[in-house]
Amino acid sequence: MTELRLMAVHAHPDDESSKGAATMARYVDEGVRVMVVTLTGGERGDILNKAMDIPEVHGRMPQIRRDEMAKAASILGVEHHWLGFVDSGLPEGDPLPPLPEGCFALEPLEVPTEALVQVIRDFKPHVMTTYDENGGYPHPDHIRCHQVSVAAYEAAADHRLYPTAGEPWNVQKLYYNHGFLRQRMQVLQDEFVRHGQEGPFAKWLEKWDPDDDLLGKRVTTRIECAKYFAQRDEALLAHATQIDPNSFFFTTPLEWQHRLWPTEEFELARSRVPVRLPETDLFAGIEGR
Ligand SMILES: [Zn+2]
């Protein structure tokens, strides 16, 4: 039996646990080798969990985020690689402040692309996942993550490019994560209302830009992974400085999610193998499947 390999490219530590984590856990369970590549160290992440907003944490964020990431990777059963760039932070204010010197989003595209090409040629994934051109949400590192991943998907296969970064490797398929769907939120919100509860999503749904509904239309691939939702939540909680255990991520009972929305969603963005859409498997059409 051929070994299958999946590589998930993410901007910061914790992104892997909030986007496609249950899918990764499922593939690990099926014997697929899964590697998460995190492009930055997440050094500029705010502490979003009050319980962790303490002096012992503040001076040690880079190390703490490494420890959190290692714990999440072990919960999901994935291999992990740091690409080593510096978090750009989320610029806030009007006008937006300039990006900090030396950060990931200011690196010339070919620098992180070559670094990722090297990891791709080494790990030889059949399938890669990343974000769409909007980054999933408008963090400069997420948009850059998209650009670097697409460039590296193309370049890794081209022997003329980055010849010192290893032997060319054809990744067969490239996907975008699409976990943040209006329809999913609506279905879960309706269930809260049915139970006479206020529900955490009403405000989100109210201010949702109608154009964002298009995202749902871009989904090509639904992965059944409800069995792994608990593992996903545990991995997310491992990022203790970033995730408030009382946040909306955890308010929907798992039983409702199993019943009402048992999948994670992806968009097939590039393929070097023939495909038939929609799909229920990221490896559909790949030899050895
Ligand atoms: Zn992020």
Image (cartoon, rainbow, N blue to C red):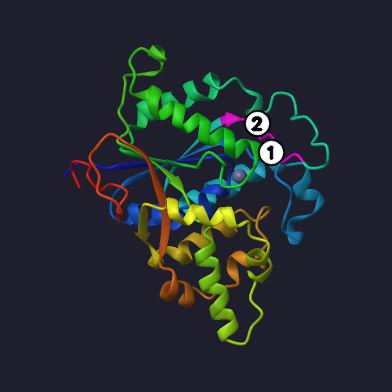
- Characterize the local packing of mark 1: few (<14), some (14-19) or many (20 or more) Cα atoms within 10 angstroms: many
Image location (x, y in percent) of residue 76? 44, 54
Prevalent SS, magenta region: loop
Residue at position x 64%, y 43% from top?
A: 138
Image location (x, y in percent) of residue 12? 59, 42
Question: Residue type at mark 2?
Answer: Val
Outermost residue, front side: 210
Residue at position x 24%, y 37% from top?
A: 273
Looking at the picture, tell me which residue is in the foreground, 110 or 95.
95
Q: CA distance from mark 2 to mark 1?
A: 7 Å
Q: Is residue 196 left or right of residue 16?
A: right
In the image, which residues are magenta? 84-91
Q: Is residue 77 visible?
A: no
Q: Given contact means CB atoms under 8 Å apart, are the residues at marks 2 and 1 in contact?
A: yes
Residue at position x 75%, y 61% from top?
A: 51
Image location (x, y in percent) of residue 19? 50, 52
Location of mark 1 (residue): 43
Looking at the picture, tell me which residue is in the foreground, 58 or 206.
206
Residue at position x 36%, y 27% from top?
A: 122
Q: Is residue 179 left or right of residue 197?
A: left
Q: Is residue 166 magenta?
A: no
